[in-house]
Amino acid sequence: MTRKTNKSQRKPQKLYLSLLAALSIFVCTYIATSNHIADSNPIKQAAQLLIGKNKVISSNGSKSHQATPSQELANTVMTDTVKNALGRRIEWSGAGSFIINHNKTDLNADIASQPYANNQTKVVQGQMVPTVANALLSKMTRQYRNRQETGNGRTNWQPAGWHQLYDLPGDYDHAVDRGHLLAYALVGGLKRFDASTSNPQNVATQAAWANEANSSNSRGQNYYETLIRKALDRHKRVRYRVTLIYDSNNNILASGSHLEAKSSDGSLEFNVFIPNVQSGLTFDYATGQVKAN
């Protein structure tokens, strides 16, 4: 009788220990992989050791296995100059980017104007680089045809600061893209606006992640352009501004892209900063040179 009692007591104990072990693994995994916890946090580092996720971190804090830049990597471009340009209310999104002014913008979308798009530029090291793009978008500016159909296909033209790397590990196998300030899908339907990939007024060298990322937990420029595309598809009018922020007047690469958008009915609004970074890479913003960590 005593043996049966001991066995019956051991069963709930084993179940309790199994549940505790499973919960511990779940908590450690969450801490080790969370973008909301700094990689320099000793608790996160301990959790990474426990689950075998510790990787060598480069001098700028980026890891080649991460698709979404860590907060440490994103912060490498957040100098006083960049912060002053963005304003005081800067929050980490947890998805590679920053939210500015609680996602509110001072853009006025309720204006009686025909759709338009224009660009501002400057000359750096003898080369033209974009600085600001402004647009009022509507269903008529939306482009649904692919580039080949409209004569805006592939090009060999390279924007200022172009230094490419290929065959990289992770989700992005190359370093940089021809990044549009005003995307082809948003303004390609606007007459007399050059939405090609070889317009130096509207295209800058941009890290592949910063340009392409498009998910709720990895928010590059494409993520926010998708929000605008969906609004235009619903016949909304959207005021849109993209400002490239350079840490120095002599930098050939922007530190990141400040995106602001607002629809005339208020159903869409955002104010964000996309750092021009990519996990596993280190950029020299003065020259455009890039190296794999």
Image (spheres, rainbow, N blue to C red):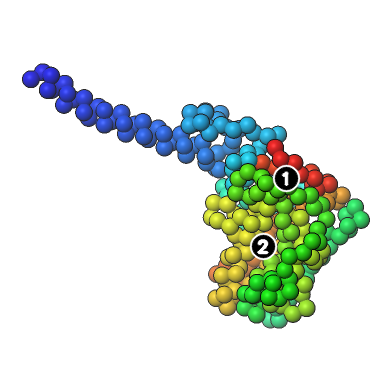
* Residue annotated with mark 1: 77
Q: Does 49 sit left or right of 199 as displayed?
A: left
Give the percent coordinates (x, y) of residue 224: 61, 61
Give the quadrant of residue 109.
bottom right
Count of numbered circles in the view: 2
Image height check: is 283 above or below 99? Answer: above
Residue 276: x, y in percent? Answer: 71, 50
The percent coordinates of residue 95 (x first, y second) are 58, 49
Q: Position of residue 105 (x, y in %)?
A: 65, 62
Residue under the image location 43 percent in, 36 percent down: 27
Q: Earlier in the sequence, mark 1 or mark 2?
A: 1
Q: Secondary structure at mark 2?
A: strand
Does residue 293 lie above or below 275 as drawn? above
Tell me which residue sits at (40%, 32%) in the image: 24
**Front residue of 7 and 268:** 7
Q: Residues within 10 Å of mark 2 (few under 14, many from 20)?
A: many
The reply to whether residue 242 is visible in this rendering is yes
The answer to whether any part of residue 269 appears in the image is no
Amino acid type of disc 1?
Answer: Val
The answer to which quarter of the image holds residue 216 is bottom right
Kind of residue indicated by mark 2: Glu
Report the Cα–Cα distance between label 1 and label 2: 19 Å
Picture residue at 59% right of the left edge, 74% below the top: 232
Residue visible at 60% across and 59% down?
A: 223
The N terminus sits in image quarter: top left
